Image (tube, rainbow, N blue to C red):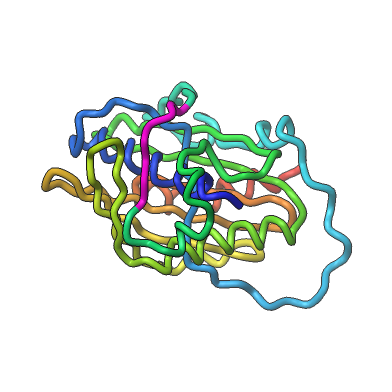
């Protein structure tokens, strides 16, 4: 996994920070990326896992407005620009590859993503990403990113010339799936802070990532996991 997979998380949260008035940027984001707090279940061997799902199939399993309820508006997907983003104060992130500091998601080819704003609450949003690969690749890839992120309780991200302080805190994830990662990230710039929660759940060959306002993440995580693993 290259560092750009981690930096996509940073870009996503920086966008939320900007929306909250902590910067003057207006760049939009397509969703989360990763998360932390590995609480791996030690389970016996299962029957052979099913084949990974295609991106087309994953898109059918994303949450939509009917799943979320009233007040949610889908955000148009936009491509990230090649903004100058660097990380300072976290050697573990540097070890993942310092030259690749910008990206648009976890580095798995089979993926789908969506994001929504929640109109009743100012600057609230929730985003979902689905990834599919072999169980081993998903577990190793997500675990490596998680370890790097949580090895640094605080660090700085420079978005162009703008410094943003990032503080991370592992939190317990709901007991869903085979593996779970969850953390709270506080982004502080220009004297203002914004809190983002990110939780990832792996069940077999699919990883569900939900991020955004903590209350919205908690409200929709189980629903997202259930839909991601339903047939059809």
Using the image, determine if residue 1 lies above or below residue 227: below
Q: Position of residue 136 (x, y in %)?
A: 74, 61
Image position of 53 (left or right of 67):
right
**Range of residues picked out in magenta:** 80-87
- Residue shown at 21%/50% (left/top)? 188
- Residue 46 sits in quarter: bottom right
Report the quarter where the C terminus lies. top right
Image position of 208 (left or right of 133):
left
Q: Main secondary structure of the magenta part?
A: loop
- Residue shown at 29%/54% (left/top)? 156
Using the image, determine if residue 62 lies above or below residue 97: above
- Residue shown at 66%/44% (left/top)? 108
Q: Position of residue 36 (x, y in %)?
A: 47, 62
Image position of 92 (left or right of 139):
left
Please check the rendered image and state whether residue 84 is part of the magenta-colored stretch, yes or no: yes
Using the image, determine if residue 127 lies above or below residue 48: above
Using the image, determine if residue 44 lies above or below residue 134: below
Q: Which is more toward the observer, 104 or 231?
A: 104
- Number of labels in the image equals 0
- Residue 135 sits in quarter: bottom right
Q: Position of residue 221 (x, y in %)?
A: 51, 51
- Residue shown at 46%/43% (left/top)? 101
Q: Position of residue 99 (x, y in %)?
A: 49, 45
Q: For the view shown, which residue lies furthest in the left direction?
A: 191
Q: For the view shown, which residue lies furthest in the right direction?
A: 48
Please check the rendered image and state whether residue 71 is part of the magenta-colored stretch, yes or no: no
């Amino acid at each position: 996994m290259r560092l750009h997979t981690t930096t996509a998380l940073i870009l996503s949260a920086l966008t939320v920070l900007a929306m909250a008035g902590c910067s003057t940027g207006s760049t939009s984001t397509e969703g989360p990326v990763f998360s932390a707090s590995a609480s791996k279940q030690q389970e016996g061997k299962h029957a052979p896992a099913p084949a990974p799902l295609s991106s087309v199939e994953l898109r059918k399993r994303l949450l939509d407005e009917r799943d979320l309820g009233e007040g949610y508006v889908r955000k148009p997907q936009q491509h990230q620009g090649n903004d100058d983003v660097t990380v300072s104060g976290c050697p573990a992130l540097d070890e993942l590859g310092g030259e690749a500091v910008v990206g648009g998601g976890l580095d798995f080819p089979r993926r789908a993503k969506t994001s929504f704003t929640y109109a009743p609450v100012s600057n609230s949003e929730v985003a979902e990403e689905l990834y599919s690969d072999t169980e081993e690749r998903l577990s190793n890839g997500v675990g490596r990113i998680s370890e790097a992120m949580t090895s640094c309780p605080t660090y700085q991200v420079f978005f162009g010339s703008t410094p943003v302080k990032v503080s991370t805190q592992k939190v317990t994830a709901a007991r869903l799936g085979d593996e779970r990662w969850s953390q709270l990230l506080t982004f502080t710039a220009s004297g203002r802070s914004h809190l983002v929660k990110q939780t990832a759940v792996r069940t077999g060959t699919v990883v569900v990532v939900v991020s955004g306002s903590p209350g919205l993440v908690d409200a929709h995580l189980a629903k997202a996991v259930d839909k991601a693993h339903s047939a059809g």
